[in-house]
Amino acid sequence: MINLGVCVGSRFCGARGALAAFTGLTLGPICIVILLAILYDHFSYIEYVKGALKGIAAVGVGLIASTGFKMLKDEFRYPPMLIVIALTILAGTYFNLGLGWVVLIVAPAALYFARKKTKKL
């Protein structure tokens, strides 16, 4: 979206139009996120807020799991990729590692098997 806005702004008004399009498309969301951070900092101790955020986190996990299950169908056609899935689940659940560590640990195996998969197909 931002690329399209910059292209259109540049086409009609040059560099100023591109800058205006970029600013217009990013300033609103940035202000909203900053406002939410301020509100969270102010109201984070309230139990209702904690409960709402736990519910939002559960929805996020559900959406990620749904996407993962849709992607899993393709991985059954190339079984070595199941090793990547097993490593991810093991690192995240058993060792209770954060997302950054899981990505750092699993990425080399994922890249290796993905390269093998593309050469095979």
Image (cartoon, rainbow, N blue to C red):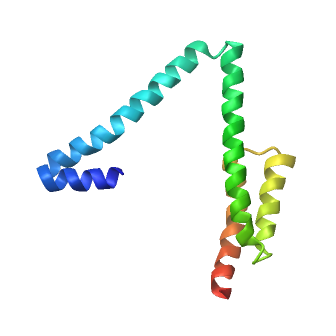
Q: From the viewer's perspective, is residue 105 above or below residue 110? A: above
> Residue at the location (74% across, 59% down)?
69
- Relative to the observer, which residue lies in front, 73 or 111? 73
Q: From the viewer's perspective, is residue 56 above or below residue 12? A: above
On the image, the x and y values in percent for residue 3 come to 32, 55
On the image, the x and y values in percent for residue 79 come to 80, 75
Q: Residue furthest right?
A: 94
On the image, the x and y values in percent for residue 21 come to 25, 44
Q: From the viewer's perspective, is residue 26 above or below residue 72? A: above
- Relative to the observer, which residue lies in front, 60 or 87? 60
> Residue at the location (81% across, 68% down)?
83
Q: Is residue 94 left or right of residue 63?
A: right
Q: From the viewer's perspective, is residue 47 above or below residue 91? A: above
On the image, the x and y values in percent for residue 103 come to 68, 55
Determine which quarter of the picture holds residue 40. top right
Q: Is residue 52 left or right of residue 23?
A: right
Q: Is residue 51 left or right of residue 44?
A: right
